[in-house]
Image (tube, rainbow, N blue to C red):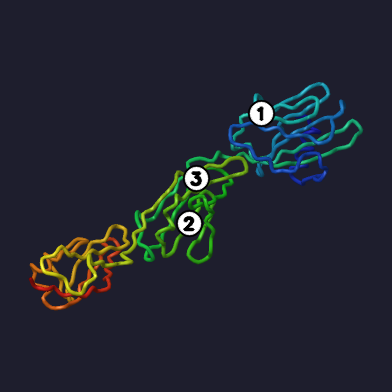
């Protein structure tokens, strides 16, 4: 680069001389690593104009290329990757590297003796990839657990969005909290409910040029037992001995509940959802009227919930 061009480049990089000449588009210009970029020049070029392109990464400055009426000279550092269109002065850079991120300065020495300068920032972005959701817990207990999901991704200038069954997850400042960082986002769910993570939960990482979504994520939330109901096979308060009468207990629970049976607070030697009259009589119960109930238990939540009692007595033959 000649002395005049070098002086102009140094002056522009250090002082920002004449910025605002509107000879370059508004930046920044974002481009994915490895791709190409062309920076347009807004004023129409005349045959006598000298076009000087420079670069600064904030620490050092360098000439990229100079276009004169007699041809283009490309700096050794940019040979094979930079070119200047002789008709319009546009600068094209190919196979962009991370080190190409910075300010590109343009100086136009017009045939009329004017000096025009402009500057535009180019940001070389790493592609968006490897979007993954992880959980701090392998499983959760409804209303007891606080679950933190982390969405991590590779890429530059990322923003993150979360959806549950395609519906946006919104930070409510109470139970649901979103915390975004440069390459990750955290979704914190306090006092988790069974439907919070049925999903599928999907996290999407986005920059201005690309986006990628995670694989669908689900987390088991154990709950219950609740809605514990006991149903007799007959509604009479007096049950004939040796009949096919039974009691059935049900509950909403994940995992499925186990059941224990009681007669007037005394535990029967019986398990399972169904208690038969045969078992009741074999253990010496039923001669006097009494209350029968079941207790549903969940091995994961450690909760035990009784049913309402059913009252009856067994009549002899």
Camera-side residue of 225 and 92: 225
Question: Mark 2 or 3 closer to N-term?
Answer: 3
Residue 234, located in which quarter of the rendered image? Answer: bottom left
- Give the residue number, with chain letter if any, for mark 3: 153
158 on left or right of 287 = right
Residue at mark 1 to residue at mark 2: CA–CA distance = 44 Å
Q: Residues within 10 Å of mark 3 (few under 14, many from 20)?
A: many
Q: Position of residue 224 (x, y in %)?
A: 32, 64
Residue 194, located in which quarter of the rendered image? Answer: bottom left
Local secondary structure at mark 2: strand
- Give the residue number, with chain letter if any, for mark 2: 187
Q: Are marks 3 and 1 in contact (CB under 8 Å)?
A: no
Residue 51, located in which quarter of the rendered image? Answer: top right
Q: Position of residue 296 (x, y in %)?
A: 25, 66
Q: Position of residue 29 (x, y in %)?
A: 68, 40
174 on left or right of 143 = right
In the rendered image, the quadrant that contains the C terminus is bottom left
- Give the residue number, with chain letter if any, for mark 1: 78
Disc number lying in front (2 or 3): 2
Local secondary structure at mark 1: helix
Q: Position of residue 131 (x, y in %)?
A: 48, 44
Disc number lying in front (1 or 2): 2
In the rendered image, the quadrant that contains the N terminus is top right
């Amino acid at each position: 680069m000649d002395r005049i061009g070098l002086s102009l480049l140094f002056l522009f990089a250090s002082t920002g001389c004449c910025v605002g000449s509107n000879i370059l588009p508004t930046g920044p210009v974002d481009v994915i690593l490895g791709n190409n970029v062309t920076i347009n020049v807004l004023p129409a070029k005349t045959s006598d104009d000298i076009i000087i392109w420079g670069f600064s990464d904030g620490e050092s400055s360098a000439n990229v290329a100079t276009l004169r009426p007699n041809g283009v000279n490309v700096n050794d550092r940019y040979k094979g990757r930079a070119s200047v269109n002789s008709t319009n002065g546009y600068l094209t850079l190919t196979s962009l590297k991370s080190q190409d991120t910075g300010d590109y300065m343009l100086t136009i020495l017009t045939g009329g003796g004017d000096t025009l300068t402009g500057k535009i920032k180019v940001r070389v972005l790493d592609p968006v990839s490897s979007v993954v959701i992880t959980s701090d817990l392998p499983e959760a207990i409804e209303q007891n657990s606080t679950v933190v999901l982390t969405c991590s991704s590779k890429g530059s200038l990322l923003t993150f969005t979360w959806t549950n069954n395609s519906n946006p997850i919104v930070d409510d400042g109470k139970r649901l909290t979103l915390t975004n960082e440069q390459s990750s986002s955290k979704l914190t769910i306090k006092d988790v409910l069974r439907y919070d993570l049925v999903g599928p939960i999907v996290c999407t990482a986005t920059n201005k040029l690309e986006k990628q979504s995670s694989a669908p994520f689900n987390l088991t939330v154990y709950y219950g037992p609740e809605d514990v109901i006991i149903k007799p096979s007959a509604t009479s308060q007096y049950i004939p001995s040796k009949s096919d009468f039974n009691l059935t207990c049900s509950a909403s629970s994940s995992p499925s509940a186990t059941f224990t049976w009681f007669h007037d607070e005394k535990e029967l030697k019986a398990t399972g959802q169904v208690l038969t009259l045969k078992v009741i009589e074999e253990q010496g119960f039923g001669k006097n009227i009494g209350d029968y109930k079941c207790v549903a238990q969940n091995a994961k939540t450690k909760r035990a919930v009784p049913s309402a009692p059913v009252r009856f007595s067994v009549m002899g033959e």
